[in-house]
Image: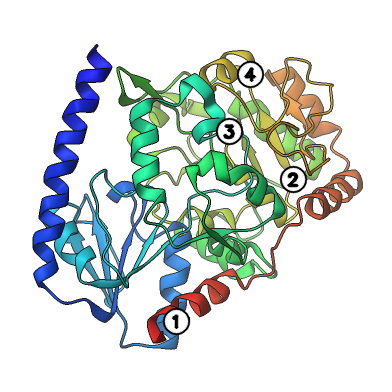
Amino acid sequence: MKEQNYIRYRKLKAFGNRICFMLCRIFPVKKNRISVCTFEGKGGFGCNPKYIVEELHRRNTDYEFVWFVNNMQKEFPPYIRKVPNTLWSRAYWLSTSKVWIDNYRKPYGTCKRKGQYYINTWHGTIGFKSMGLWRGEAFSKMAYLVSKNDSDMIDSAVIDSKWCTEVWPRGMVYDGECIRTGAPRCDVLFGDRSRYREAFRKKYGISKDANIVMFAPTFREGVTNGKRTVFSEEWTLDFERLLHNLEIRFGGKWYLCLRVHPQLASDIKAHKGELLQDKVVDASQEDDMYEVLAAMDAFITDYSSAAMDASYAHMPVFIYADDIEKYVNERGSMLWNLSTDSQKPVANNKEMTPGIDVVLPYPIAQDNEELEANILNFDANKYISMMKQFESAVELIFNGRASAGVSDRVEDYIRY
């Protein structure tokens, strides 16, 4: 009953939102105006939209960019207008923009006008976590309504593989056009990454020859009576032991870069022991994770899709998942057949990706002992070989030109 009442409330609120959008249709659409948003306004100048905007601005300085933010203190290049992510602000700016770019979902009740172009880049492509209808009962009715409202407005979705063509129709509740350009945010991971390495080490006072591993645990989110909640659990990963093992296996001096969701960033202080104070960098408040990722030498996570992105640059990736059974049950399903047997090869879930046969290239650990063994026994040649098989099986597009490909499509539509 509580969920039903909440849904009625959200539908009524959405009706009010639509009225605001309808009223703003008295204003004309500006052909050169492009409205952008990331993570429902919680994000800043980052993720896939950032790289598309940079490319479009490089091509034509007459484009007018509007970016919705919850925090007006966020920093942006001078050619981008920051606007508050409020109802009337969204209603006006979206209603007068020729192009919309987003990496998440538009608020329930948002309305698109005829002749506008909405391109959704999402914030992940190939990943671990099931989404949308693949989650079964774990996907709430309210989540479905929000997803359907948004997907019905999308003109094009950005993907990077055959994998996405099989997963997204049910995962995104979307059956429209998909543009196979690759993920724009991954362009910085292609080819020479030296300038990102140097910039990150200079910013945080780390020597140029130091090695850095990023730990980016999954952002956990739950639903209670249809309402979303954010939660965090204590990490069991032994940071000191992790760095020690990386130094034994790969040599050199290693540092740890922590990247958790900004809402959980305050928890980091509790994990900085006295022995690690000078070897831990907190990059959780950085708006663009991918310029940070491009500076890394290794990556570790539980279920973040950034593992796949990092591995495209062929840096070592390790999975530390100490709650597999619990997480799979809460999520409803997973895109991979993860089990509590760490030695068992992890293949793709054939129900979700029937046209693909591939094994996950990353070693799985459920505790610090298993992670230690995976690091010390890491075989670079075997890893690269498995990565190439993985890239071939999913028909990955990763060539450093995703931003250009998406920008081509946007400009085609603007000229239309």
Q: Residues within 10 Å of mark 3 (few under 14, many from 20)?
A: some
Location of residue 264 by image quarter: top left
**Residue under numbered circle 3:** 129
How much space separates mark 1 and mark 3, taking CA atoms? 33 Å
Q: Nearer the viewer, mark 1 or mark 3?
A: 1
**Residue under numbered circle 4:** 324
Would you say 361 lies left or right of 41 here?
right
Q: How many marks?
A: 4
Q: Position of residue 87 (x, y in %)?
A: 14, 51
Q: Is residue 218 visible?
A: no
Secondary-structure class at tag 3: loop
Q: Residues within 10 Å of mark 2 (few under 14, many from 20)?
A: many
Q: Residue furthest front?
A: 114
**Residue under numbered circle 2:** 316
Q: Identify which amino acid the numbered label 2 is placed on.
A: Pro
Q: Is residue 109 visible?
A: yes
Secondary-structure class at tag 1: helix
Tag 2 or tag 1, which sits nearer the N-term? Answer: 2
